[in-house]
Amino acid sequence: MSHLLRYRTALRAVAALLLLATPAARPDSLPMWEVNGAANRVAILGSIHFLKPGRDPLPAAVVEAYQNADVVVMEIDLDDLDAAAAQASLNRLGIDPQARTLQQIMRPGDFAAARAKAQAAGIDLDLLQGFEPWLAALTVTQLRLASLGYDANAGVERQVLEMAQRDRKEIRGLETVEQQFNAMDRLPLAAQSAFLLETLDDAATMEEQVDTIVTAWKQGDIRRLETEFLHGLKAQPDLYRRIVVNRNRDWAGKLNVLLRDRHDYLVVVGTLHLVGPDSLIRMLEHAGYAPRQVMAPAPGTLH
């Protein structure tokens, strides 16, 4: 999703299927794949959207992939993002059109459970009463990450964006902010409530979860990333279908067009979209391509 739907709360959407078919991580692997087109090459990088400032610079192989790319493609075109328009879209979609509160939208039992979970996690649910459940869930995630020192401005996309802006490289988006918010807003209310409850469950242990994810990302440990990102989503099929499967299918079609081009590309999307049985990588394989995971160069290797 966009930079609101981050880490395990948005990522715990599907059961970890086919894990036994996933190879064990190599110590020199990266969360990045390369795909050869007819006359070009597309690098696909899994992003961690929130990182701690100054702590996690991009690996050298990622910087090299950026340097080799003529065009950078992200989930949304951050270079041309209209913050005011995005906020207006979020307000329009994330606030109930009938001005109902979160308590009025959710079933009584679900809201009572949400309140209990929020209290256990030290979260004042009353501050989220003006939001629909999906936006309340995203807000909990964002606030919790901020309290742990994680910042979207230090995330992978922002680091790539800064390089591309400095070098005046073309930046494109796979979808719009409106499309991202719509994917959540169109969830049935029961699915939105389940998403909020799952998010509140995760809030208390988020620091450990995020640390595990960031460590696995640095090591290119796809098996661990698949487990962390997809665990729990089997119970939320609507969420999984809308934020993972449908979007991956759409993006695979767009990448198929890029692979017929002559320009080289760096595509940066949330790592969630690159793991599991319905991943963008698997969809490209089914389309006849052969994505290969990139290995980090050994220390002292010349590029």
Image: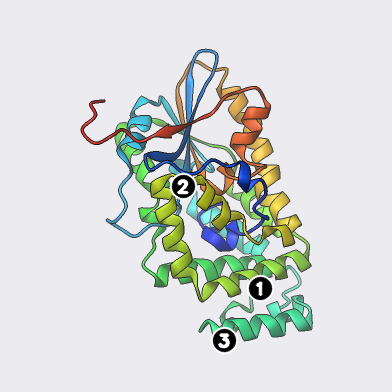
> Tag 2: residue type?
Asp
Residue denoted by label 2:
221
Q: Residue type at mark 1: give it.
A: Leu
Distance between the Cα atoms at labels 1 and 3? 12 Å
Locate residue 155, reporting x and y percent.
40, 52
Residue under label 3: 119
| 170 w.r.t. 76: above or below | above
Q: Are there few (<14), some (14-19), or many (20+) residues within 10 Å of tag 2?
A: many
- The residue that appears at 28% across and 34% down in the rendered structure is 298
Q: Amino acid at mark 3?
A: Gln
Task: Residue at 46%, 37% (x, y): give it.
Answer: 32
Judged from the image, the secondary structure of the residue bearing numbered disc 2 is loop
Question: Is residue 204 left or right of 247 when viewed as pictured?
Answer: left
Q: Earlier in the sequence, mark 3 or mark 2?
A: 3
Q: Which residue is mark 1?
A: 197
Q: Is residue 32 visible?
A: yes
Q: Residue at x 74, y 79 (%)?
A: 110
* Label 2 vs 1, first from the N-terminus: 1
In the image, residue 136 sits, relative to residue 291, either above or below, namely below
Dot 1, how many residues are within 10 Å of its Cα: few (below 14), some (14-19), or many (20+)?
Answer: many
- At x 62% / y 46%, what residue is drawn? 20
